[in-house]
Image (spheres, rainbow, N blue to C red):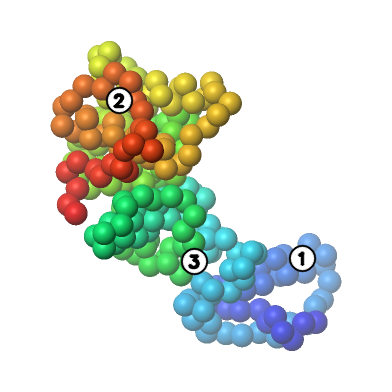
Amino acid sequence: YNPLEPLGFREDGTCCQGQHRLWAVVKSGTTQHFDVRRNVNDALFTVIDTGKMRAGSDVLAIAGETCTVQLTAALKWIERERRARVRAKAGGDYRLGDRDQIENATLLTLLQEHPGIRDSVRRAWMVSPVRLILPSVLVWVHYRAHRIDPEWCEQYFNDFGYGVDLSKDSPALAVRNWGLNNLASTRRPTAETVAAVVIKGWNRSYTKKPWKMARWASEQEPFPKMEGEEW
C-alpha cells in the first residue's frame, strides 16, 4: 500500500495511472489496497512520470493512437522544424538538430494541430520496405510534401521507395541509391543529414531538376527549405 501513488482514472473511466500495478494484481491473483483518484484531467496526465518512466509514445498509446514510436518521432520533427523557423526569422541559422526536448503535453497538442500525420505514418511504412530512410524522417517529410502536392508527393515517395523505371538522373533514384549505400556502410548519417537529403530530393523532383548523386554537405550548405511550402 502506497498512499503517495494512487490509481488515476479519467472522467470517462479509463485508467491513466497505475496500469502496471493493476496487471500485477491480475497476474498474481492477490488482493491489494490502493488509493483511487477519479476525474483526473488529461492535462495533468501528460506530465505524470515524464522524468523517465513514461515516454511520449506511452502518452499517445494510452490516448488510443497506433504506431506510436514513429508517430512520436515525426511529431518531434514537426516541433523542431517550427522552432528552427523561429530562430531563423530572428536572425539565427535554420538548423534542426535532434537535441531539443519536446515535452509530452506538446505532442498531444501537435497531434491535434496535425491530424494528417497519422496517414503519413501508414503510408511511409509502405514505401520504404527495406528501411532505406529513417522512418521518423520519412513520415515527417511525407506529411509536409503531401500538404504541398498530394499527387506529386505519392509519385516521389513511390519512386525512391521502389525504384521502378527511373531515369539515371532522377532525384528519387539518387535518394534511393544514397539510402542503399548507407545500409551497406558502417557509418550511418545523422538524422538531420537524412532529412536534408530527402528534402533536397523532393526539391529537385518538385522543380523537375536532375540529380545524379544525392548529398548534403552540412558544413557548407544550410539546411534545405522545402519547395512549395510557405514560409
Q: Amino acid at mark 3?
A: Asn
* Mark 1 crowdedness (10 Å alpha carbons): few <14, some 14-19, many ≥20: few
Toward which corner of the image does residue 163 lie, by quadrant? top left
Q: CA distance from mark 2 to mark 3?
A: 34 Å
Callout 2: SS: helix
Q: Amino acid at mark 1?
A: Ala
Q: State yes or no: discs 2 and 3 in contact (Cβ < 8 Å).
A: no
**Residue 194 x, y percent position in the rendering:** 41, 36
Callout 3: SS: helix
Q: State yes or no: discs 1 and 3 in contact (Cβ < 8 Å).
A: no
Q: Which mark is residue 24?
A: 1
Residue at (57% x, 78% y) in the render: 9
Toward which corner of the image does residue 177 lie, by quadrant? top left
* Mark 2 crowdedness (10 Å alpha carbons): few <14, some 14-19, many ≥20: many
Which label sits in the foreground, 1 or 3?
Answer: 3
Q: CA distance from mark 1 to mark 3?
A: 26 Å
Relative height, residue 14 to residue 172 (above, below):
below
